[in-house]
Image: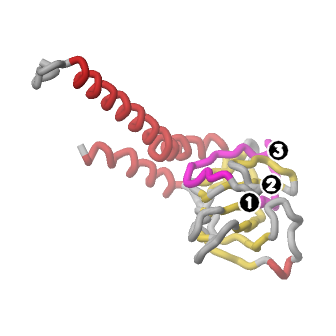
Amino acid sequence: MGVFAALPLAWLYQLHDQLTPVVDVLATALAAPRSLSPPESAWAVVQLPEKLCRFDCKTTFKRYRAQLDLPTSSALYVPSFDSAIMVRSDGDEVATIGNIEPPVAEYAYRPTLIRLPSESRTDALLEITVSSIVSEGGRLAAFYVGSESTLNAPYRWARLLSVDLTSYTSFALAIAVLLAFSLYLFGGNDRAYLW
């Protein structure tokens, strides 16, 4: 059974290996999530994945940016982040996942696929702002930018394995507990069930 459970995970890693992640980005700390970008001297090159908060953090805001060539019908695939993100493309807000303003809503470690503006562009400025509330938490994984059709399969598998499967398992467990409790209540002295 363990081999069959590991097959989708192995296939997901194979899909990720076929993609080229964005690893080297510029980053800077922010006073507030929607604040203007600081001067160029405040930016430093970091490698993803990066943990935002190392010791006793309350709320941390960090902005990452990269100059990328965007194909037509492009998308951004972020395998995991902690706790909320906001994505901008050339200064225009494209998406916000979770509540990035304090109090920050935790939407952690869920894969996310975000459609970017549809026109093809070279040297597009992509900015990702991460808000974190977790003590010793906050992270951004290496992300992927490409055509939506290419990124859709890894996104769907990652979502199935990390979010949907957990929900289905919780639902099945709740049904099993309800069934066991009803058998206990209405079964009387029977000790053998499901004959």
In the rendered image, residue 48, in percent from the top left (x then y), is placed at: 61, 69
Q: Which mark is residue 119?
A: 3
Tag of residue 88: 2
Image check: 89 left or right of 164? right
- Above or below: residue 149 compared with residue 15: above
Instruction: Return the x and y of residue 102 as percentages of the image width and height.
Output: 75, 57
Q: Which mark is residue 187?
A: none
Residue 132 belongs to the span the image colors magenta: no
In whole angstroms, how far apart are the C-alphas of marks 1 and 3?
20 Å
Q: Count the numbered circles shown.
A: 3
Q: Which residues are magenta?
A: 105-127
- Where is residue 128? Give x, y as percent: 74, 60
- How crowded pointer 2 is (Cα within 10 Å; few <14, some 14-19, many 20+) is rated as some
Foreground pick, 108 / 104:
104
Q: Secondary structure at mark 2?
A: strand
Mark 2 and mark 1 in contact (Cβ < 8 Å)? yes
Query: Residue 157 at what x, y percent from top left?
Result: 49, 43
Picture residue at 58% right of the left edge, 68% below the top: 135
Circle 3 sits in a helix, a strand or a loop, which is it?
loop
Q: Residues within 10 Å of mark 1 (few under 14, many from 20)?
A: many
Which mark is on residue 128? Answer: 1
Q: Quadrant of residue 33?
A: bottom right
Determine the secondary structure under disc 1: strand
- Say which residue appears at 45% left-offset and 44% top-offset: 161
Q: Which kind of residue does numbered mark 1 sit on? A: Ile
Marks 3 and 2: in contact by CB < 8 Å? no
Taking depth in this image into account, of 140 and 18 the one nearest to the observer is: 140
Identity of the residue drawn at 69% across and 66% down: 59
Residue drawn at (57%, 56%), measured in percent from left and top? 80
